[in-house]
Amino acid sequence: MTEWMISLINQFGFWAILFLIALENVFPPIPSEVILSFGGFLTLHTKMSLWEVVLASTIGSVLGALILYYIGSLFTEVRLKKLVNNKFIKMLGFKEDDVSKTIAWFNKHGKGAIFYGRFVPIIRSLISIPAGTAQVKLSLFVGLTFLGSLIWNTVLSSLGFYFGSKWDIVVQIIDDYAILCAGLLVIAFGIGCVYWYKKRIKK
């Protein structure tokens, strides 16, 4: 996959980066660090400038996020409550009221996650779905997504430019960062589940 992406960027430049980053937002396993760091490196050997790489990748990030936002908007509160009424879901201890509380929490506290989530691999894509479900104002969602993505894309593209032919070092750094983030998320999720079940048992 990496060789295919590099070939595509070599051939189509700006538009390839836009397309690949949009695709990466919808399908998180696609490595954005390869796209961005290699794009930064290419600016040393092509007419494409660093700001073009950043602009293309940021536009792509917003487009991909909007697709997931729309998918999230299909999971309305009413539909989620129907899902929670499923016998298997009920056996896990979930109730209709949990849906309303979760959406209310995201509307109150989750907006920051739209911005900060752009700096966490996998989460940077998936955060768009609950934002759509919670019906976060579209202009706010686009603004936070654009700003967060702009920072992330600028950093990775600039690192690719700085390391030059050794741009793959950036990929390794981000891979290690992703592993660390994944470990912390698993721990946080585990603690959250334990807390939730203890609270539910007390009730």
Image: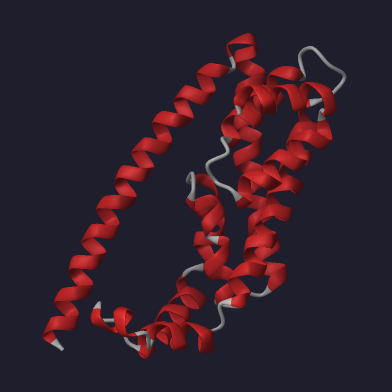
Quarter of the image with the C terminus is bottom left
Q: Residue 117 location in percent, x, y?
A: 50, 53
Q: Is residue 154 above or below residue 122?
A: above
Q: Residue 16 location in percent, x, y?
A: 78, 34
- The answer to which of 4 and 142 lies nearer the viewer is 4
Total marks placed:
0
* Residue for point 48% across, 30% down: 174
Q: How is the image coloured?
A: secondary structure
Q: Quadrant of residue 95?
A: bottom left
Q: Residue 118 location in percent, x, y?
A: 55, 50
- The answer to which of 111 and 6 lies nearer the viewer is 6
Residue 103 falls left or right of residue 163: left
Quarter of the image with the N terminus is top right
Q: Is residue 173 above or below residue 90?
A: above
Q: Is residue 168 above or below residue 63?
A: above
Identify the residue at the far top of this view. 165
* Residue for point 64% across, 38% down: 153
Residue 68 falls left or right of residue 181: right
Q: Quadrant of residue 81?
A: bottom left
Residue 195 falls left or right of residue 90: left
Q: Residue 137 location in percent, x, y?
A: 66, 75
* Residue for point 36% across, 44% down: 182
Identify the residue at the far right of this view. 47
Identify the residue at the far left of this view. 202
Q: Is residue 53 above or below residue 58?
A: above
Residue 203 falls left or right of residue 140: left
* Residue for point 60% across, 40% down: 152
